[in-house]
Amino acid sequence: MSANKSSIPTELGTEKIGRLLKQYALPAIIAQTAASLYNMVDSIFIGQGVGPLAISGLAVTFPLMNLSTAFGTLVGAGAAVMLSVLLGQKNYKAANKVLGNVVSLNIIIGLIFMAAALIFIDPILYFFGASENTLPYAKEYITIILIGNVITHVYFGLNAAMRSSGFPKKAMALTIFTVVFNTLLDPIFIFVFDMGIAGAAWATVIAQTVAMIIVLKHFSDKERAFHFEKGIFKLDMRVAKDSLAIGMGPFLMNAAACLVTLFINQQLRDYSGDLGIGAYGICNRLIFMFIMICMGLNQGMQPIAGYNYGAKQYSRVKEVFWMTAKLGTVVTCICFIIGMFFPRVAVGIFTHDEALMEMASHGLRILVLGFPIVGFQMIGTNFFQCLGMVKKSVILSLSRQILFLLPLLYALPLWHDASGVWMSFPVSDVLSATLTAILLRRLFKKFNRLQDGQESSILGSQI
């Protein structure tokens, strides 16, 4: 491995934090923004080319897609953290073994998920809020997406590994490529070939297949610090256990999103009908862009925080957190301004149906009330994950959606009907941000007692 050590990004421990965050976060932000556009493109073309009920059908699939994403992040996010910390420790052989297990675990989990979901697809979609009107659209779309589930898992897992191993710009470019390719295919399949909602699904699967081939080729290059080689694909139970443990935070966050979206759909269907689900689907796509920008900041922070924690440079760990938290707050404040003052303009991108526009605009204005503090909460939650602090990451991941949001979804509508469903979001945002601040305060008290180079027991034995 010595010939490849020159490509290890050791500047993570020496370069200025601001410059590093720009170097790593900017490509990730661009990539995540592109990924959010990826999701928006399907919604826009489906809404404009198929109709409002198709939008509602698409929204019904969100819980299942969130669950699929949860299993993907269970592997990818944990492996990305392990790679960053192992780089800081200069343990290159172990890092290469992690790379091989990213592929193996994603294939195994992806196949199991696909088979289970396809067998029970009808009852799952009804459970997630489908009606007789929206089931045909939802089933047609999600069946195709599930067929490409393994491809999606492998691609996103290796893309995260590419970013963490010193190629953030290439990871960004690959994500942008998938968005552009998907955007080109959508109108061809939907309008020219008249494939309807199925055309949008096939466009997504084809774009991700091409992207997976490219990232596989990247890691097949033996001149790189991390590359595919004989023996690394054999499932290593210790690596798998550590990777899954660290990835449990984002997994539970996405799994909770699946569960909560299920109850949101059911509540909106009861209080507002199929169009209520469609309205939430539109709002979800809009705010998702800003959430993904924050996730891009998180991805930029992750290798910097992980590397410097592994290298025992605690002052740099603290510095990258505060810088990232401030930027995340700015992003979600912008979302607040757009959602509060220009909701109809934003909603109009997806539909011209007046009833759906009115419902979505009303919901969006309420939904963003707590967004000025959402950025801080997201960065704080991810910070614990970056350092391998699984329990705290899991607690914060679940707090907003399970501990706070889920009970509020049923309590507030008793007083405010459909508006109560929407109000549950900002209330849970405030509560979860408060909990995040409390746990971060305790963590930084510990950090303040540590000197750079001093051994820390905070991380434990996950890596």
Image (cartoon, rainbow, N blue to C red):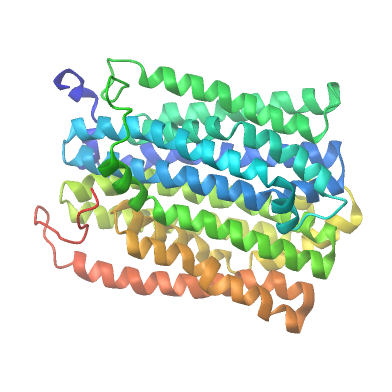
Question: Where is residue 126 drawn, in percent x and y?
Answer: 75, 55
Q: Is residue 223 left or right of residue 61?
A: left
Query: Which residue is nearer to you in this view: 345 or 60?
Result: 60
**Where's residue 416, x and y in %?**
76, 80
**In what quadrant of the picture does the N terminus appear?**
top left
Residue located 20% across and 61% down the image: 458
Q: Position of residue 418 (x, y in %)?
A: 78, 72
The residue at 69%/64% (across/down) is 264
Q: Residue at x 61, y 63 (%)?
A: 260
Give the residue furthest to the front: 119
Nearest to the observer: residue 331 or residue 416: 416
* Image position of 288 (left or right of 5): right
Q: Is 224 placed above or below 367 here?
A: above
Image position of 459 (left or right of 426): left
Q: Position of residue 169 (x, y in %)?
A: 42, 29
Nearest the camera: 377 or 277?
277
- State whether residue 30 appears in this view: no
